[in-house]
């Protein structure tokens, strides 16, 4: 429960770190007349509420002589980031385990607000969120300063218990935890503690690793702002994400090209990053760079086993999640999500394809290495081991996408990506089908009378159509994207449904193209 | 002591934008209803508009290009120039 505990005692010294140089002392903080220490923790919702509600008042308090400092029981980087996100406009400090300062202040829970007067005496303490007690505490500060201070609005909840202070955890339990290797000394565990992860272990981005990732590149160069939090994508941060993801430095030019494409406004990463849809960012790589860095386009092309594929896609997703702030369950509002949101990078098997590769279709030369970004859903595998004509096979492939996005949502404006396996591709090659012919056939094959589509979620187009009118699955043949990848044996192709309703366009960037993007 | 790492976060401290002052009454106020173009958002705004007009507000409608992108700065400026208040509708 929250209650006020005025303590007339000297305020203990602070053993904390701050994002700015210089020692922090009680005397220094209270030099203007009084100091307010707000002990908080990132994991504590009540702490977040206190930071959000009190943060905007800090500048006015500072002007009147009350210096407010949020003291986090978290790493300093976490403290800075959380403060910024929650609008805390006061000073920020962080204490490391074993949280000596919290112990010295006899903290039981966070948030705890401590008012200290100019003489360094504790004038009052409030634990948890207790609006009335906090207003009273600010009233005490007014008396100390002889000035009026703004108070937080009386918004519900007026009372909210806090969370256990990390200093209040049984030291024996903490010791056991440390022996088990979960203490900060373990770099991988520390990444989890900092929140620098997508839920899987990451490689700690030491300065040496980031420097190696950057090579000769200038880390201060900015590729753009990463939505939704509009964090600056400096090459150093992109390199940090690449290290976290497990990339080798040789992959970095591909990661950079993927980031450039993703940050093109035409791709609308903003919408994709925060949507309730499951959409991920599919990275398709074409050109000589595939073999140069070991991207797999053959057996298991959409699955695990190859470092380049798995880490390049993951680096982009970490940029969106960490630099861009699209943390699942927070600004990333995906209802269910899908595993492709961990990262999804595939390479086209241009050598097994009977057709011009994707990047050539999009205007690049065959010898160029190109990354293409497509907002897409998870893959649906399509088995067809029985078709004996290209028409039958094309019909089976096309109708597999009939339920893409939603069963009766016809026509789709956005692209469906078909990954054609080599055996299926070979049937089209043998029959002399061009990519254009296959695409046109698939487009023509999938249609239904509007009357059969008027159930549940459907489109305004269907509602407006004559009931007998045939409605195609796609608005145009161009909404069917065809690439070739997969093992030489087995007749399994796949289709990836679209990210819809966002005007997200397919965007390509040449690997090694200048930044910022010129087109 | 924590090890030194290169942060993937943009840790610039950005000042929080204060909320605009809330009016005591909407009578006589100019209110723009912003349709973000989500499905059925216009229906919701129709109802809100009727209620606002009943309370004495002058209303006008505006719309974003698409729901999934931030409003264009020109649109925000236009709303700020022509309205005392804005109502933005989510829907689905």
Image (cartoon, coloured by chain):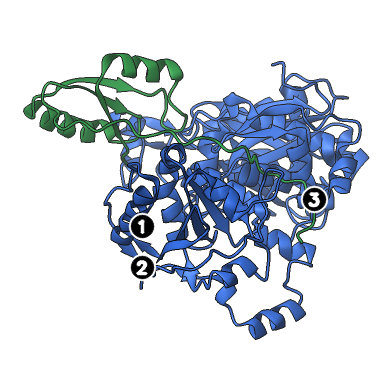
Chain colours: A blue, B green
Q: Residue furthest bottom?
A: A172
Q: What subunit carries mark 3? A: A
Going by the image, does A225 lie left or right of B66?
Answer: right
Q: What subunit carries mark 1? A: A
Q: Which residue is mark 1?
A: A137
Mark 1 neighbour class, 10 Å CA radius: few under 14, some 14 to 19, many 20 or more: many
Rendering coords of residue A496 (x, y %): 60, 44
Secondary structure beneath dot 3 equals loop
CA distance for labels 3 and 2: 43 Å
Q: Which residue is mark 2?
A: A4
Going by the image, does A464 lie left or right of A193?
Answer: left
Rendering coords of residue B83 (x, y %): 26, 19
Depth order, front residue of A505/A353: A505
Going by the image, does A403 lie left or right of A383?
Answer: left
**Quadrant of the image occupied by residue A362:** top right
Rendering coords of residue B33 (x, y %): 25, 26
Secondary structure beneath dot 1 equals helix
């Amino acid at each position: 429960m929250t209650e006020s505990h005025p303590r007339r005692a000297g305020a203990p010294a602070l053993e904390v770190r701050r994002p700015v140089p210089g020692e922090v002392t009680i005397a220094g903080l209270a030099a203007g007349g009084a100091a307010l220490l707000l002990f908080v923790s990132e994991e504590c919702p009540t702490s977040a509420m206190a930071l959000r509600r009190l943060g905007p008042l800090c500048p006015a308090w500072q002007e009147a002589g009350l210096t407010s400092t949020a003291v986090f029981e978290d790493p300093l980087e976490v403290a800075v980031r959380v403060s910024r996100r929650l609008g805390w406009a006061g000073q920020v400090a962080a204490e490391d385990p074993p949280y000596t300062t919290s112990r010295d202040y006899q903290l039981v829970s966070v948030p705890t607000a401590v008012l200290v007067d100019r003489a360094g005496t504790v004038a009052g303490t409030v634990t948890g969120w207790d609006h009335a007690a906090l207003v009273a505490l600010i009233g005490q500060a007014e008396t100390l300063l002889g000035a009026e201070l703004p108070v937080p609005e009386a918004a519900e909840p007026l009372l909210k218990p806090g969370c256990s202070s990390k200093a209040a955890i049984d030291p024996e339990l903490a010791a056991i935890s440390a022996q088990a290797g979960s203490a900060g000394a373990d770099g991988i565990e520390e990444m989890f503690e900092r929140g620098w992860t997508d839920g899987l272990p990451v490689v700690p981005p030491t300065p040496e690793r980031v420097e190696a990732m950057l090579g000769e590149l200038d880390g201060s160069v900015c590729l753009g702002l990463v939505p939704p939090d509009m964090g600056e994508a400096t090459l150093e941060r992109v390199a940090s994400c690449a290290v976290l993801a497990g990339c080798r430095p040789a992959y970095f030019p591909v990661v950079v090209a993927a980031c450039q494409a993703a940050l093109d406004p035409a791709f609308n990463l903003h919408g994709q990053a925060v949507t309730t849809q499951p959409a991920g960012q599919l990275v398709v790589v074409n050109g000589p760079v595939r073999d140069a860095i070991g991207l797999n386009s053959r057996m298991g092309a959409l699955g695990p086993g190859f470092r380049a594929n798995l880490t390049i896609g993951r680096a982009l997703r970490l940029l969106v999640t960490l630099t861009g702030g699209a943390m699942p369950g927070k600004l990333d509002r995906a209802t269910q999500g899908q595993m492709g949101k961990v990262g999804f990078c595939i390479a086209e098997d241009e050598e097994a394809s009977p057709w011009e590769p994707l990047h050539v279709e999009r205007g690049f030369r065959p010898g160029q290495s190109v990354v293409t970004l497509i907002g897409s859903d998870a893959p649906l595998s399509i088995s067809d081991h029985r078709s004996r004509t290209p028409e039958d096979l094309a019909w089976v492939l096309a109708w597999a996408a009939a339920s893409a996005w939603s069963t009766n949502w016809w026509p789709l404006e956005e692209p469906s990506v078909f990954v054609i396996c080599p055996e299926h591709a070979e049937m089209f090659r043998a029959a002399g089908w061009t990519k254009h012919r296959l695409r046109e056939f698939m487009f023509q094959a999938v249609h239904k009378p509007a009357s059969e589509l008027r159930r549940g979620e459907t489109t305004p187009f269907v509602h407006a159509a004559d009931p007998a009118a045939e409605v195609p699955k796609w608005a145009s043949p161009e909404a069917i994207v065809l690439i070739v990848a997969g093992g030489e044996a087995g007749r399994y192709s796949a289709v990836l449904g679209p990210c819809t309703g966002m005007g997200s366009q397919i965007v390509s960037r040449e690997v090694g193209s200048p930044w910022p993007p010129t087109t | 002591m924590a090890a030194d790492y290169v942060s993937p976060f943009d840790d610039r401290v950005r000042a929080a934008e204060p909320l605009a002052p809330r009016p005591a009454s909407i009578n006589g106020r100019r209110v723009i209803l912003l349709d973000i173009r989500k499905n059925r958002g216009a229906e919701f705004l129709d109802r809100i508009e009727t209620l606002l007009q009943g309370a004495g507000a002058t209303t006008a409608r505006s719309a974003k290009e698409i729901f999934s992108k931030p409003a264009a700065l020109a649109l925000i400026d236009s709303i700020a120039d022509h309205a005392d208040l804005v109502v933005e509708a989510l829907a689905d």
